[in-house]
Amino acid sequence: MTNDNKFPPEKNQPAGYVPPNVWTWERESGGVFAGINRPTAGARSDSELPVGNHPHQLYSLGTPNGMKVSILFEELLEAGYAEAEYDAWFIDIGQGDQFGSGFVAVNPNSKIPALVDWQPRLDSGAQIEPVRVFESGSILLYLAEKFAAFLPQDVPGRSETINWLMWQMGAGPLLGGGFGHFYVYAPLKIEYAIDRFAMEAKRQLDVLDRHLAANQFMAGDFYTIADMAIWPWYGRLALHQIYDDAGTFLSVDDYQHLQDWARLIEARPAVKRGVLVNRKDGLKERHAAADFA
């Protein structure tokens, strides 16, 4: 490969590195998840997923992406939707549970969360097969539509909710896989990478702060799945609850409108329960409301 970079190769990290014409995976890259990361998909072991007694079976971990769905389930139950009962099973991504054959059958991308609905809506009067749903945004939309809750029915409100839901799905990887990875999880600190993603993280925080200056919730006056998608990442970052001292590093206290919104969401009883689900330091498995006791 020709070196088109204006900097000489000896300035690269590591010194002298020049990308090859064809990339090959020769060794683990280091970092927290080095032992499970590979450039291939598919099952690595035969293991069936457990199934509980409720219609909805959630296979997840209490990361920000996992919290989105458990928060929605708890909000649905809080609002009186008894048919939203669910079993939540712990998926240990550090141990590679997401590469078991049962999980891969639900989500071929091997990422949490994943959902199986064993009691889907009726189609033309006939029961359809259990529905698999993967990607956190897809699960939120699926459940909101199924129960006609937390998703406005008017066209402007629905569009605004989905706008911000899609914003989070597109922006989140830059905060998580970008800033979070290089600031917390990477095996070495790379100034260029941290500066690049810190700048983008702060731009995103500014986007939210400006929007929330004129809106109580992400879609206006109504609490929706957009808030549930954004809060576990950006709300908890604003409250100094993720990525060690990243909140101080990014000066999150400067975003006052985001702070107010983050505290408003945090105070909701269903959110307080939802963030505990599928966490080793919380509720590893959830099968009934009584489990929180």
Image (spheres, rainbow, N blue to C red):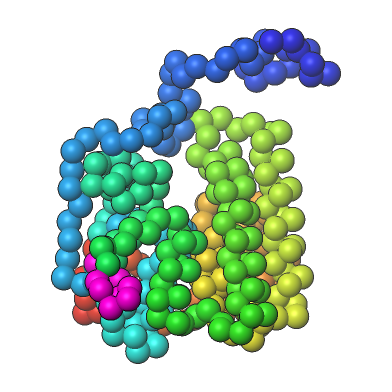
**Furthest residue to the front?**
124
Based on the displayed image, in which of its 4 quarters is residue 130 positioned?
Answer: bottom left
**Could one spot residue 284 in this view of the protein?**
no
Q: On screen, 42 above or below 264? A: above
Residue 193 placed where, x, y %?
67, 35
Residue 18 placed where, x, y %?
66, 13
Q: In the image, which residues are magenta?
A: 118-127
Question: Which secondary structure type mostly characterizes the magenta part of the structure?
Answer: loop
Based on the displayed image, in which of its 4 quarters is residue 101 positioned?
Answer: top left
The residue lying at 52 percent from left, 52 percent from top is: 244
State which quarter of the image contains the C terminus.
Answer: bottom left
**Furthest residue to the bottom?**
80
Residue 120 on the magenta span: yes
Q: On screen, 86 above or below 197? A: below
Comparing 197 with 243, the one in front is 197
Q: Is residue 69 left or right of residue 158?
A: left
Residue 257 on the magenta span: no
